[in-house]
Amino acid sequence: MKEAYLPEKHTDFIVSIIGEELGFVAVVSVILLYLLLGASAFGISAATPDATGQLAASGLGLMLWLPSVRAYRRGCRRIADHWYRRAST
């Protein structure tokens, strides 16, 4: 059931929009896909025989994976701050 809790979707955190539109299972699926992306990048890096290929594969994996982790942490911190402010007032 759609709650329409997010007032302006174009400025909000993308995972919260996915959670509102598609639900908890979709959010967990997106998180698992990012974990799979990071694991496959490091798997490719480990299988590469030369150091240049290892650095390139791990660097590209980190370039794709770290921003998503930072975004999730930022979104979770916002939720925690919101709950804390609501509970303290």
Image (cartoon, rainbow, N blue to C red):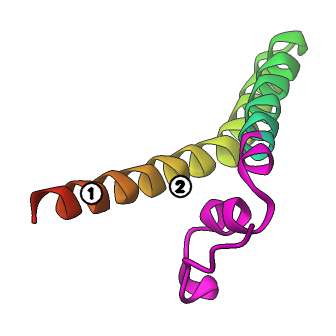
Q: Earlier in the sequence, mark 1 or mark 2?
A: 2
Residue 87 x, y percent position in the rendering: 18, 56
Magenta residues (range): 1-28
Q: Is residue 89 left or right of residue 46?
A: left
Q: Nearer the viewer, residue 86 or 11?
A: 86
Q: Residue at x 75, y 67 (%)?
A: 1
Q: Residue at x 68, y 59 (%)?
A: 19
Q: Nearer the viewer, residue 58 or 6?
A: 6
Q: Is residue 64 left or right of residue 83?
A: right
- The quadrant of the picture occupied by the C terminus is bottom left
Please identify the quarter of the rendering in which residue 88 is found. bottom left
Please identify the quarter of the rendering in which residue 40 is found. top right
Q: Main secondary structure of the magenta part?
A: helix
Q: Disc 1 or disc 2, which is closer to the eye?
A: 1
Q: Which residue is mark 2?
A: 71
Q: Which residue is mark 1?
A: 81
